[in-house]
Image (cartoon, rainbow, N blue to C red):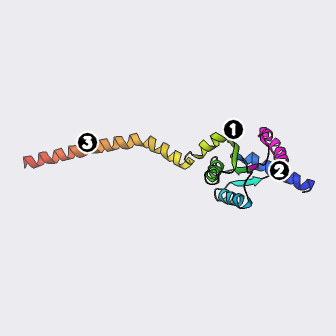
Amino acid sequence: MGKEQKQQAVAELAEKIEAAKAIVLTDFTGMDVLTISELRRQCREAKVEYRVVKNTLTRLAARQTRFGFLADKLDGPTGLAISSSDELAPARVISGFRRRYQLPVIRLGLVEGKLVDSDEVERLALLPSKEILLGQVAGLLTAPMSKLSFALTFKLRQLRIAIEELKKRKT
């Protein structure tokens, strides 16, 4: 790879790191080509990009972003799972893949600009999606109103039945 190609690769990677909502750094040691291909396929389906890039290029790219501290965390073979749309997608894909294949090893994650360890990445992977959480919050907010509505409707129904019974008795 020539100098210009390396500079272009660093600039492209820096742009992806800067735009990322979440990044998971993995150690892919022990994975064969078929396994990595399967991981990449699963990542693509989840709109996550899985890249294996030389650490020197990744260090240079990270130092060009607000996440310069990532440069110090790169050691050994490193794969990056990057998502610019969903904060939890990389954690879900990598964690799910790990459950099946026991690889890759999660080193750390970067979610919304915050560094998280491998255990935290695993916990984040278990969280429901944003849409489900918003639905649960909406349900919690509407529950008291629907209960009140039901209670009022029930009392009105009882009142209507009582009035009808009085009418029947008077006739």
Q: Residue at 45%, 45% (x, y): give it.
A: 139
What's the CA distance linking mark 3 and mark 1?
52 Å
Q: Is residue 23 visible?
A: no
Q: Is residue 56 magenta?
A: yes
12 in relation to 140, above or below? below
Q: Sequence order check: which comes first, mark 3 or mark 1? A: 1
What's the CA distance linking mark 1 and mark 2?
23 Å
Residue under pointer 1: 114
Q: Amino acid at mark 3?
A: Lys
For the residue carrying disc 2, how many other residues have a C-alpha within 10 Å: few (<14), some (14-19), or many (20+)? few
Closer to the camera in the image, 17 or 117? 117
Q: Sequence order check: which comes first, mark 1 or mark 2? A: 2
Q: Amino acid at mark 1?
A: Lys
For the residue carrying disc 1, how many other residues have a C-alpha within 10 Å: few (<14), some (14-19), or many (20+)? few
Q: Is residue 140 magenta?
A: no
Q: Residue furthest right?
A: 3
Residue 109 place in picture, x, y as percent: 69, 43
Q: Left or right: where does residue 100 sit relative to residue 34?
A: left
Q: In the image, which disc is placed on residue 155?
A: 3
Q: Amino acid at mark 2?
A: Lys
Q: Residue at 69%, 59% (x, y): give it.
A: 35
Foreground mark, 1 or 2, reads 2
What's the CA distance linking mark 2 and mark 3?
71 Å
Residue 65 place in picture, x, y as percent: 79, 42
